[in-house]
Every structure is written in structure tokens, then in C-alpha cells.
Image: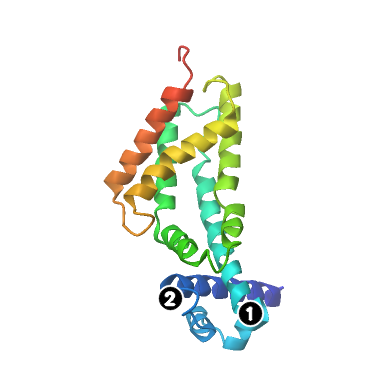
Amino acid sequence: MNGGRGRIDKRQAILAGAFDVFARRGYAHAGVQEIADEAGVAKPTVYNHLVDKPTLFRQAIGAAAQAALVERLAALEPLHERAGDLRATMETVARRLVRSHCDARSCALRRLLYSEIATFPDALDIVREHGPHRLNQALADRFARLMLAGRLRHGDPAQAAEQFTALLVGPLEARSEMGTREVGDEELDQVALGAVRTFLLAHGDPGPG
């Protein structure tokens, strides 16, 4: 069991180290030896786990996207049909989502995608598998439950999820200049609160309570 755990830990360290090196140096200038040094393993160990550099790149961005998804799914936890003050709950969720979207690793992932998409046209699909599509599915499920409970207007929960995500991500991409500029807490809160306000104008329950 310990051997298996150690192998998993080494693989995770290699993927994390590879992502950091690719983000810092770009794919073309990143060396496997530098990645091994970053991960604290021998160079042959990298090849034992990940075969070659293209595989390493694809696996590294996939792991980074998966880690971001886990964090964003956790941000949705307060959003359920029994939430007391729906606006306040959505504001809490939105604040967490915008901070996750603009943290250093998420910005680095987007910059890496933009710069390497010509070399790796499948990279977007790899990230999408663990990114916006999965988040929107989870968000749509939450909104569907809120609609059934009468907390939101009845409608298409998948479309509502896409719209809420767009209200968050659109302004963030503009303000962060596609992940190249740090966005401060005050700006992040402005985006989060504005998104919730606009979303509830369109989808909030029009009835009493």
C-alpha cells in the first residue's frame, strides 16, 4: 500500500512541478530536467510516470484544471433549496468563485492555454472536461432544485447556469486582461455582487418571500 501511495505522490509532484515550469517557461523552453528538479525527482522518474513531454504537458494542464474544478464545486456547497437568504448565499458563492477564477494558478492555466493552443489544439478540450462544462452542470443542478422549491423563476436551469457564469467570467476576463493583471478584492467583490444582482433581476422569484 505504501508503495502505491508513494507512486501516486510522485506523480502528483511531477504534474505540479511540470505545470509550474510550463507556466513559467512555456512549452518549447521547458526542459524535462528542470521539471524533474522542480518536482524533486530524478529525470528518469519523470519518463517512468509520464512517457514523454507532450503527455506530460497534457496531464499537467488536466491536473491543474481538475484541482480548480474541485475548489469551484466546493464553492457551490452553500447553494441549496434550504438556503435562508438566497441573495446573501449567492453573493457568498459568487465571491468564492471569482477568487478561484482569478487565483494565480487559474490565471497561469489560462495564459498557458492561450499561448500553446496552436501546438496543442486538444488542450482546450482537456481543460473543458474539468472546467466550465462540469461547473455549469453542477450549477444547473443547484438552480433546478431552487426552481422546484420556488426560490427562482421556473425556466431552463442549464441556461440560467450559463448566464450566471457569464456574468462572473466576462467582467473578470476584461478586468484581469485575460489573466495578465491582478484584480484586487474590491474589484472582485464588485463583479460578484453585480453578477448576483443582475441574475436575480432575471431569475429571482417574483412572488412574496
**Does residue 123 show up?**
yes
State how far apart marks 2 and 1 are (Cα). Answer: 17 Å
- Would residue 120 be found to the left or right of residue 167 on screen? right
Q: Nearer the viewer, residue 104 or 165?
A: 165
Q: Earlier in the sequence, mark 2 or mark 1?
A: 2
Which x, y percent locates residue 161? Answer: 53, 35
The answer to which image quadrant residue 85 occupies is: top left
Q: Quadrant of the C terminus?
A: top left
Q: How is the image coloured?
A: rainbow
Residue, disc 1: 52
Which label number is shown at residue 25?
Answer: 2
The answer to which image quadrant residue 58 occupies is: bottom right
Amino acid carrying label 2: it is Arg
**27 w.r.t. 143: above or below:** below
Which label number is shown at residue 94?
Answer: none
Identified at 48% across, 73% down, the residue is: 22
**Does residue 96 show up?**
no
Identified at 45% across, 24% down, the residue is: 202
Instruction: Label 2: state its secondary structure.
Output: helix
Count of numbered circles on the image: 2
Callout 2–callout 1 Cβ contact below 8 Å: no
Which x, y percent locates residue 191? Answer: 35, 40
Amino acid carrying label 1: it is Asp
Quick one: which residue is furthest to the top in this view? 208
Q: Residues within 10 Å of mark 1 (few under 14, many from 20)?
A: few
Identified at 46% across, 40% down, the residue is: 166
